[in-house]
Image (cartoon, grey):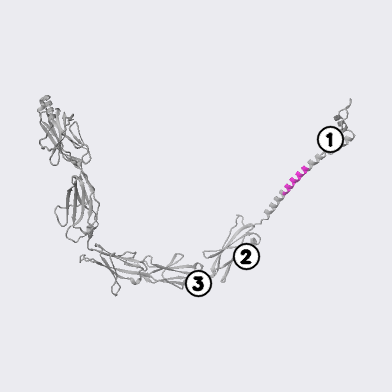
Amino acid sequence: MEPPGPGRASSPRTLPVPGRALHLLLLALLLGGAPGAQTETQVSAPRLVEVMKGEPVTLNCSLSGAGGKEHLALQWLVTDRWGNTSPLVFAVGRMGALKRSGDPRVKPSMPFQLHPNGSLQLLSAEMGDERDYTCQILNGTAEKAQATSHLRVLVAPEPPEVIPNKGTISVVDDKAHEIATCTSRNANPAPNITWYRDGEALEIPTELNGELYAVSRTVREASGLHSLTSILYLRPKKADRDVAFHCRATYHLPNGQQGQQDAAPFYLTLHYPTENVQFWVASPAAPGGWVREGDTVSLLCRGDGNPTPEYIFTLKQGKKEEKSLETNTNGTLTLGRISRDQSGLYQCEVADFDADPEVELTQKLEIHVGYLDPLELSPGENVTLSLGDTTELGCLASGDPTPKVLWMKDSIPLDQGPHFTLTNVSFNSAGIYTCEASVPKLPGLTRSRTLQLLVQGGPELKPEEMRPQGSSGWTEGDEVTLTCSARGHPTPKLSWNHEGEPVNRIISGWVQSSLKLKVMGTVAREGVTCTASNHLGHDQHTFHFEAVASQAPQAGVAVMAAAVSVGLLLLVVALFYCMRRKGRCCRSREKVPPLPPEPEPSRPGMDRPEQTGLLSGGGGGGGSRGGHSFGDEC
């Protein structure tokens, strides 16, 4: 902000003081001057004061010598960048008790405060406030002492912007290429720009050369702020293909401090020739280039040049001519469901004409396709033998590399090799036998076949004895479940010599039958027989029940107890009946009083009817009824 002057420019050294006020001040100083008024007065102020834009700042003015004790006049003047000086504020009084003295010719244009000690405070520093500020003192002798401070208003720049070269830069060229442009805008003073490679600052020389240099340009904007642009020139190397570059803007802060802002990192797209070629099998493969027949095999060829060159694939098999397979830029040769006739010497050639002649651009890879043919069983998948026979089982396996054969039964290994001998076969020898062939060099390349062996013979019976439920042995009426198991070929049938509904099932090659019955009668005396039979023979087993106790004693006790209970019950009923009959008899034989006679007219000297009745009761007619009643008492 440019504070306008009083309307005309004044000389930097001829600093006017308002005439009327100055004359009054000088008159007062001369009238009230002390003997020490002739002492020289000195003024000091910091040469440079820095403040961030928008923040308040104070310009100090210090007075030394005897003048500090006298009445004096102080004024602040401001000088713009063109050298024009204008008064800003005027004050009189003693130092520490200065008061502003208005003058219509002084027209300040910025918000400020003048403190009693003479310091000048700007409330909000702006770019227009960046000027020279002079503190001038006039004492009683009209001598002048002054000091000047330069105010610098600092502004942090906007975040830097970088524009990288998006083209492809060749590392073969012998000159430096333009890499990127970095711009830091609107700062005060102008910022600095530093370039970084992989986090380390580049030491950029000042002179132009073919390896590394930078060109910078500073622009003063209309706002008074500064913008800096730096262009980096570099002759890149192949090692720079994956390296991050970035630029950093450094700017000033108050009190000698510095701030910094980083631009986003960027990477270079470089053109460099092939120096190394690699050729390998990407899909799962065994050492020595072995792959499994039927797999999808991918062969990868990679050169380290950029841009990606063309890859040429060929196949050489024995004395046959070399066979062209495929040409592409992705460096991948895919062989779907590879077969044994695709074994051979594969070759990859990188077509890079910028490569050094000494670089080997061709790589070869020997591929062996491992295979395993279907297995052949002898004497076949179903073999039937008789008990005691001896036989040899065969499993023929062919493949490349040579496979290994393992015989198993119920997943339990038996023997290795294509032949397995069985001697003196039994029913335990029957079951499913598995022949498994595998190629140790190629995990997962396996084949297997199963063989079912049947051993024919008469039944083999296995009973399951049942123990008595009680500790004293069997008792008639006990329930028991008898179980018989049998095996053989053909499958035997199980039967019982006792009626019932047996439950039959097959468990692990055994036919099992269970019969539920009661131990009594012929069962207790003769036992129960289980019979297994087929057309080759039969076998049987009889279940015996030793020392079967009879239930009779217990039945007699129960009958006797029941008879006693019934007898007691009849006795109680008879007693009750007798008592009921006795009660009825007694009531029927009790004396019934006669009806009273008809009342007669009362005559003197006659007795009362009650007395008459009582007397007559002991007489003739009354006596006979009374005698019958008393004679038949219960």
Q: Which portion, as a residue range, is magenta?
A: 566-580
As drawn, the label of residue 497 is 2
Tell me the residue that label 3 is attached to. 384
- What is the x, y in percent for residue 403? 38, 69
CA–CA distance between discs 2 and 1? 89 Å
Assess whether residue 574 is covered by the magenta stretch: yes
| Residue type at tag 2 | Asn
Residue nearest the observer in this picture, 239 or 278:
239
| Residue type at tag 3 | Thr
| Residue 191 seen in the current view | no
Tell me the residue that label 1 is attached to. 593
Residue nearest the observer in this picture, 406 or 179:
179
* Cβ atoms at labels 3 and 1 below 8 Å apart: no
The single residue placed furthest to the right in the displayed view is 620
* Predominant SS along the magenta part: helix
Which residue sits at x=77%, y=42%? 580
Quarter of the figure with residue 266: bottom left
Q: In the image, which is nearer the foreground, mark 3 or mark 1?
A: 1
CA–CA distance between discs 3 and 1? 118 Å
Q: What element carries label 2?
A: loop
Residue nearest the observer in this picture, 110 or 93:
110
